Image: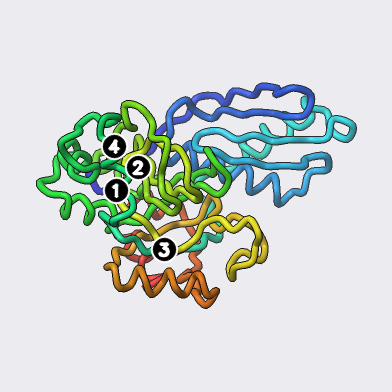
Amino acid sequence: MSEDVIERRSLPEPRYTYGGDDHVFVELDEAMSFDANFKAMAITQQVRRRDIDGVVEVCPANASYLLRFDPDRLHPDALIETLEEIAADIDLTDYSWDARVVEIPVLYDDPWTHEVMMDFRDNHQDPESTDLEYSARINGYDSAEAFIEAHSSQPQMVTMMGFVPGLPWMFQMVPADRQIEVPKYVQPRTNTPSRAIGYGGAFSVVYPVQGAGGYQLFGRTPVEVLDVEQSLSGFEESMVYLNPGDIVTFRRIDRDEYDRIRNAVENDSYEYTTGDLAFEPDEFFADPYGYNERVVEEVA
């Protein structure tokens, strides 16, 4: 098989479990893969589309999903039977969903995350280098610049939300042997700037608020991904901007552009750069780099 295709993964039989009186948890696989994540998204999309009476909350995750239901209206065994029917009807080779493509501008090696990471070098595997330098070295890149190019040149799928409200987990849309992988800090930090771009395992994140964290820090975006007050443009429907199934393209910016965008965000004159795409897993599996070019064109 060519290295420029996404190798499909056969999923085991799903594991259905009860969570108290009002939750059903379904594990599709123990490992994260595009097949597991896309299947979780497809099933939960169909659950929402069917508007099943008694289901009150739907939460897709990396390789699983969780449903909350009203036990006075729906028996968990009936729900599981319906979920099994939905799963049996889904074939990712003949499935698509309407995906939003969102550009997130990033100032890599910014002064704010740099200051924080230097305050916590004793918590790090390599106190003598920066997070970018360390991540570049252990992934085989000869410089931080080459590593930044690898991180920003291919889009990333939002696979789940978690850790804190509004924090997107993003998995880069490249074959497994091209995935960037980094460990978390040896000990977590007690401080991380809001809007910091972090990386742990094989996932990029955007920290929506200032707080603790353990992911390697690569940069900072001037745009918000969480607005609890929903006072900013783009947050009219939800306090959370990104959702599972969205595709993110990171665009490298300099300090002047960072300041211009941040000023626009604070003045509520910033408009997110977005596009729409009928995401087709089968076409992505067959030609990920060609497909990613189409994704980037949506926001170019």
Judging from the image, what secondary structure is the residue with disc 3 in?
loop
Q: Horizontal and vertical percent for residue 299? A: 41, 71
**Residue with the mark numbered 1:** 115
Q: Are marks 1 and 2 in contact (CB under 8 Å)?
A: no
Judging from the image, what secondary structure is the residue with disc 1 in?
helix
Q: How busy is the neighbourhood of tag 4: few (under 14 within 10 Å), some, or many (20 plus)?
A: some
Q: Are marks 3 and 2 in contact (CB under 8 Å)?
A: no
| Left or right side of 125 for 274 | right
**Residue with the mark numbered 4:** 181
Q: How busy is the neighbourhood of tag 1: few (under 14 within 10 Å), some, or many (20 plus)?
A: few
- Quote the CA–CA distance across marks 1 and 2: 17 Å
**Residue with the mark numbered 2:** 199
Q: Are marks 4 and 3 in contact (CB under 8 Å)?
A: no
- Quote the CA–CA distance across marks 4 and 3: 25 Å
| Left or right side of 156 for 19 | right
Badge 3 amino acid: Pro
Q: Are marks 3 and 1 in contact (CB under 8 Å)?
A: no
Between circles 1 and 4, the one closer to the viewer is: 1
The C terminus, quarter of image: bottom left
Q: Which of marks 4 and 3 is nearer the N terminus?
A: 4
Residue that appears at 30% across and 29% down: 123
